[in-house]
Amino acid sequence: MEALAARLSQLDSQVEGAIRVVMFYDTLMRRRVDLPALARASASLAECVAGLRLHGTGRVIRFAPDGREAPAPPSPASTTTPITLDEEEIGTVWLERSGAPGSLDPLLLDRLAIAAAAVVERYGPARTTMADPALVELAISSDSDEAARARALRLLGFAADLPVRVVAVRSPLPLDRVGTLLCPSRPVKAAPLADVGIILATTVDQDRIPAGVRAGIGAAESPDRSWREARTALRFTTSRRPVLHYAGLGALALLAQVPEDAARDNADVAAMARVAGDPGDLETLETYCAAGSLRRAADLLHLHHSSVARRLEQIGKTLDLDLTDPTGLMRARLALTAWQLLND
């Protein structure tokens, strides 16, 4: 490889040089080299320090043109290219050239990134987060037998002795990013299923869920039951409670089993639909139901408690309920929750 790199460095023809670069990396891939060998050969070919980093593990590999590991700290990269696998960016490759970038540097880095992705896929030091939706669905489907489920989980990278937590999410952020945050130590897999994203992980750190993401977390050990629980918990999330554990719902989870027609025909729920016509009234009622007290609700809404009291009095008239009475407040909470489930 060193001899080939030396010959390539002397080529004058741009086209021939490009072809030789492609052939160089094809040879490396056929030889099934590992990441250090790939970086070392690239540095020799480029005649400058070459480096790569895997996001999942934080591993950084840098080699100098003479074949030795490059000392820290690294020089500023002259050219960089992302490493992508299964449409997910899993790392970066770069050259640390002191002068202007070479004309073949973009092609060299492109081939280096492709080769690095192939090595990662082969040896799996940093598996991607995104998974085949069909395989994920097989793992969580109630129609799958245990043998098929176990095989699907094994193919997804989960060991038989590890627990698998299931999270249902709605997120404006890419699922792979949310999954990596939830379970930074991995293994973790994510896939879109209809309008809901699903994340399978060995551990779930809910404190790392970013703002704007809603998540329901299942509690059951079986992935199929945990998925149903996670999906149910997701339906109960609100802007004020964006993350919910199914186990924390308790008896409220029973509301998810009420037929929609029965819920819609209920007088309290029908009245709640009228309250929801005014976003301000709806926010006031949601805050009051969550806070449990007038003054606490006023603090959360940044309003004077007398203003909140007047709003609640008007809302109570619309609902035909006394919101200061425990029974009236309980009915309002149930009606609000049922209305939110209908409009999920």
Image: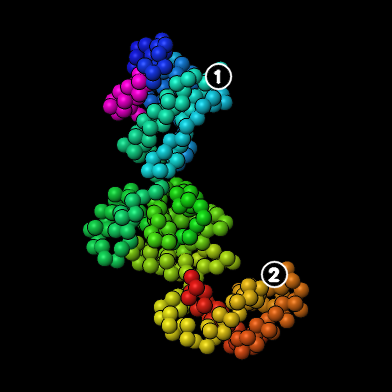
Highlighted range, magenta: 19-35
Give the mark nearest the N terminus, 2 or 1: 1
The quadrant in which residue 296 appears is bottom right
Residue ID for mark 2: 301
* Screen quadrant of the N terminus: top left
Q: Position of residue 24 (x, y in %)?
A: 34, 21
Q: In the image, what residue occupies the spot 34% across and 38% down?
A: 121
The answer to whether 176 is drawn above or below residue 38 in the figure is below
170, 148: nearer the viewer? 170
Q: Position of residue 161 (x, y in %)?
A: 32, 54
The answer to whether 287 is drawn above or below residue 75 in the figure is below
**Can residue 87 be seen at all in this image of the molecule?**
yes
Q: Position of residue 3 (x, y in %)?
A: 35, 12
Q: In the image, what residue occupies the spot 37% across and 57% down?
A: 164
Decide if residue 10 is on the left or right side of residue 76. left
Magenta region, main secondary structure:
helix
How packed mark 1 is, by other alpha carbons closer than 10 Å (few <14, some 14-19, many 20 or more), is: few
Q: In the image, what residue occupies the spot 55% across and 19% down?
A: 100
